[in-house]
Image (spheres, rainbow, N blue to C red):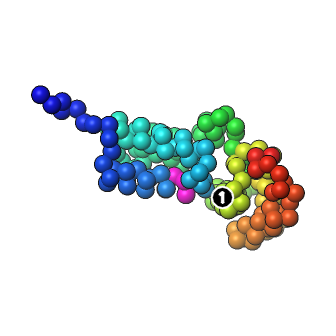
């Protein structure tokens, strides 16, 4: 007699659903597919999907990468325990003077530059980049594209781009 228990194998349409959710999470977080965090996200997604969780927002919530959980203190800790740089934290006292939308814009700017320049979201290089973006914002540069251009200029002209990527 055959077991009625469902196989752990995923069907092609299920893999497509998982991949779409995975891409959404990476896009929201500004992560590339080949980083350690993306690998952890993929493992968690597949495990939750195999447990029967199918709805996109429920999956994001279960694995801890939905927008609400990002505010959680533990959401910024990577698999290996390295804290990610957060624009909210780097902004310090300035965060009380700017709107949540502006903080989101600063975070998007930081995430875009990290993705384009393959900068891990932790370590000295990420911290330097975040502080540069905040400094430029404090000096009056409030256009997102202009902030990205300024941060990209910093990365192109920085000595750290010639050294270890996690420095």
Q: Position of residue 3 (x, y in %)?
A: 18, 30
Q: Residue at x 87, y 57 (%)?
A: 159
Q: Position of residue 8 (x, y in %)?
A: 32, 37
Residue 22 in magenta? Answer: no
In this view, which residue lies farthest toward the top? 1
Q: Quadrant of the N terminus?
A: top left
Characterize the magenta stretch by its predominant secondary structure: helix
Asked if residue 117 is positioned above or below residue 48 in the image, the reply reads below
Which secondary structure, mark 1? helix
Q: Residue at x 59, y 44 (%)?
A: 37
| Residue 142 shows in the view | no
Specify the segment rendered in magenta. Answer: 24-29
Residue 71's image quarter? top right
Asked if residue 73 is positioned above or below residue 16 in the image, the reply reads above
Q: Which residue is mark 1?
A: 115
Is residue 128 shown left or right of residue 108? right
In this view, which residue lies farthest toward the front? 1
For this rendering, which residue is in front, 153 or 161? 161
Q: Position of residue 164 (x, y in %)?
A: 79, 48
- Crowding near pointer 1: few (<14 within 10 Å), some, many (20+)? some
Is residue 161 shown left or right of residue 101? right
Q: Position of residue 114 (x, y in %)?
A: 69, 57
Q: Residue at x 68, y 62 (%)?
A: 116
Is residue 152 shown left or right of residue 57? right
| Residue 16 shows in the view | yes
For this rendering, which residue is in front, 59 or 33? 33
């Amino acid at each position: 007699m055959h077991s009625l228990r469902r196989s752990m194998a995923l069907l092609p349409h299920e893999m497509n659903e998982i991949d779409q959710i995975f891409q959404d999470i990476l896009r929201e977080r500004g992560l590339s597919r080949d980083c350690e965090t993306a690998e952890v996200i993929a493992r968690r997604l597949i495990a939750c999907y195999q447990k029967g969780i199918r709805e996109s927002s429920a999956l994001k919530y279960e694995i801890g990468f939905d927008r609400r959980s990002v505010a959680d203190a533990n959401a910024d800790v990577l698999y290996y325990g390295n804290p990610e740089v957060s624009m909210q934290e780097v902004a310090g006292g300035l965060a009380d003077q700017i709107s949540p939308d502006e903080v989101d814009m600063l975070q998007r700017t930081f995430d875009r530059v990290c993705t384009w320049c393959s900068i891990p979201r932790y370590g000295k290089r990420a911290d330097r980049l975040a502080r540069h973006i905040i400094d430029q914002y404090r000096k009056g540069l409030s256009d997102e594209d202009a902030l990205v251009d300024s941060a990209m200029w910093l990365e192109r002209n920085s000595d750290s781009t010639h050294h270890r990527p996690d420095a």
